[in-house]
Amino acid sequence: MSEKRNRAITLLSLGHACVDVYQGAVAALVPYFVAERAYSYAAASGVVLAASLLSSVVQPLFGALTDRWAMPWLLPLSALTGGVGVALSGVTDSYALTLAVVAVSGIGVAAYHPEAARAARDAAYGSHTAMGWFSLGGNIGFALAPLLVAAVVATGGLGASPLLVVPAVVGAALCSAAVRSAGRRDAGGVRGESVGSDDWSSFLRLSGAIVCRSIVFVGLSAFVSLYVRQRTGGGDMAGTVALCVLYAGGAVGTVAGGRLAERYGRLTVVRHAYVLTVLAVAGVVLVPGEAVYLFVALTSAGLYVPFSLHVTLGQDYLPRRVGTASGVTLGLTVSVGGLAAPVIGALADAASLRTALATLIVLPALGRLLLCGLREPEPPGLAPPASGSSGRRPRATSA
């Protein structure tokens, strides 16, 4: 990539890290809500649901809007919104208000991803590795979230949560720099209309597989910390380490996924990753003792290797609706996992946490079945930009 493209991808990746801290922070806060506010498993998982519910609905809407209009100003604004909601969650005086501010954070995260994914796609010029680096930023944010929450909340209690707004301020500055950089590269503000036909059947099957992956990821994010404490007999640090392993393994997996895809093809890599996830989740649930950390790491790899590939596959299956595809693959399907969190929590309350997590083993197997028969889409080209410029993108037309 050219120096300008490297700069754009770097800024977008760093901004992505700052925003996705707030997706990881919600799950990282769960043990502290349980300890300080005596939330049940079901109530704690309701906080995860609040962060996901509105996000799952509005993210495709933001994607559709970015298909029609250039909205780069969403990047810094959404970064700040995502941070403020989480920062206030520890100082609210009621469960309902906690749910509300966490939901606001989810909306901010939802607004960020479709426009950021479109900008990264433009900067990457079809490179799976470049998109892997963009996705890596989000994974790093996830991985840092438990450490950030532990540093702030474990030392100052939930009352210190306003300090968690700092990454949002940094992220807004980085996103503003990325917007200015994009503005210099595309002074007209209008991107060319994508050439190709939308393959909704393949896109919906891919989306179903991502939902399966999402439920596994959200379920483990919410409860692996508590589960590892039980399995190993360790304290708070044992659970924090497990959550960090789950997130940090994704940093390696995402970059590896892009490189493997350029050698073997995206669908081949994605299918093998789902098979790995089945075996790894079974290990987390069934293997006793310290070995659980190894299986958490393998689960992380299986979940994250296909992450950026899901995004580019979705965009190439819907070349006329790139923003919508990004909103669904990065938003709706991922956030749907949060809808399952209260079910997992209720099952843990009724039976045991181990029993609840055991139900996750079947989901990546189902996702693998949904991927059967899919074909690698051809990356679409771009038609020349429309003349004139108001910042409005060409209207998407039915294939």
Image (cartoon, grey):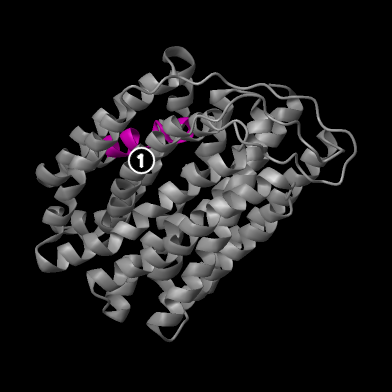
Q: Position of residue 313 (x, y in %)?
A: 49, 29
The majority secondary structure of the magenta stretch comes to helix
Residues in magenta? 297-309
Q: Is residue 389 above or below residue 266?
A: below
> What residue occupies the far top of the structure in this picture?
263
Q: Quadrant of the C terminus?
A: top right
Residue for point 46% across, 56% down: 56
On the picture, is 380 further left or further right than 176?
Answer: left
Magenta stretch: residue 246 in it? no
**Quarter assignment of residue 398:** top right
- 310 in relation to 284, above or below: above
Is the N terminus in the top left, top right, bottom left or bottom right quadrant?
top right
Whether residue 241 is visible here, answered yes or no, is no
How many numbered callouts?
Answer: 1
Q: Residues within 10 Å of mark 1 (few under 14, many from 20)?
A: some
Residue 284 appears anywhere in the view: yes
Q: Is residue 220 above or below residue 321?
A: below
Residue 192 location in percent, x, y?
A: 76, 31
Q: Position of residue 306 (x, y in %)?
A: 40, 31
What residue type is disc 1 on? Gly
Q: In the image, 272: left or right of 383?
A: left
Q: Position of residue 224 (x, y in %)?
A: 25, 54
Query: Hey, which quadrant is residue 153 in on the image?
Result: bottom left
Q: Secondary structure at mark 1?
A: helix
Instruction: Return the residue nearer the eye: 161 or 270.
Output: 270
Q: Which residue is mark 1?
A: 208
**Foreground: 340 or 178?**
340
The image shows residue 350, relative to residue 75, as above or below, that is below
Q: Tell me what residue is drawn at x 38 percent, y 35 percent.
A: 205
Question: Is 42 placed left or right of 114 in the picture?
Answer: left
Looking at this view, name the residue that lies furthest to the bottom. 93
